[in-house]
Amino acid sequence: MTKFGELLARSGLSDSEAGEYLDISAKTVRRYATGEVIAKIPYIQALKTWLELHPRAASTPVSGFTFIDLFAGIGGLRLGFEAIGGKCVFTSEWDRYSQKTYRANFPNDDHEIAGDITKIRANEIPKHDVLLAGFPASRSRLPAFPRRMRSAGRTVSPATRRARCFSTCNAALSTTVRRRSCWKT
């Protein structure tokens, strides 16, 4: 991890928040944090200054965060986030066979697996630091038969269902997430 990336992680700022503070784009913040581009010294100094002005943020460890797991499948994405100290506080997966495997993989969960995320209101999702979403981006993640699904008496195409899933993630992200999100396709 770069010095800039380390300071950014300690600050708890999102890429967009750091970009706003530093008057650069969120994309540039990500490039500096990953080392794709070497961060200019004034930006590193500005983050150090921010940490001095916000000592409480500097003492917050990177581990010990909470996350939600949407379109969870059998929980593969979750494993990496638990490995670095995260705690899953909400899970959503609509496929009953995936739910069964997920429960077997994580038998000590203190929360139930919610079903179809499009039927969950954003205010029903607990507060969290990170949103994980392995949402269905390809037709292979959607029911194959029939090609067009029935919903409330209307035919709903797989593309429409994917758009609804994406919209649901956006709603959850805009109302509840505090730090970061990770979307996997």
Image: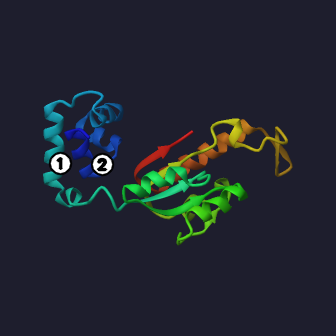
Q: Which residue is mark 2?
A: 13
For numbered disc 2, what is the local secondary structure? loop
Where residue 178 appears, x then y in whole percent? 40, 55
Q: Is residue 177 left or right of residue 142?
A: left
Residue at coordinates 61% horizontally, 58% vertically from top-left?
Answer: 92
Counting residues from the N terminus, which is met first, the one under dot 2 or under dot 1?
2
Camera-nearest residue between 96 and 15: 96
Quarter of the image with the C terminus is top right
Camera-nearest residue between 59 and 63: 63
Camera-nearest residue between 40 and 19: 40
Residue at coordinates 34% horizontally, 62% vertically from top-left?
Answer: 64
Where residue 52 appears, x then y in whole percent? 13, 53
Residue at coordinates 63% horizontally, 38% vertically from top-left?
Answer: 137
What is the distance, in whole Å, between disc 2 and disc 1 at their CAs? 10 Å
Name the image quarter holding residue 140: top right
Residue at coordinates 79% horizontally, 41% vertically from top-left?
Answer: 144
Q: Amino acid at mark 1?
A: Trp
Figure check: 134 above or below 31: below
Q: Is there a contact, CB below 8 Å, between mark 2 and mark 1? A: yes
Q: Which residue is mark 1?
A: 50
Name the image quarter holding residue 75: bottom right
Where residue 168 appears, x then y in whole percent? 60, 49
Quarter of the image with the N terminus is top left
Q: Is residue 74 left or right of residue 34?
A: right
Q: Amino acid at mark 2?
A: Leu
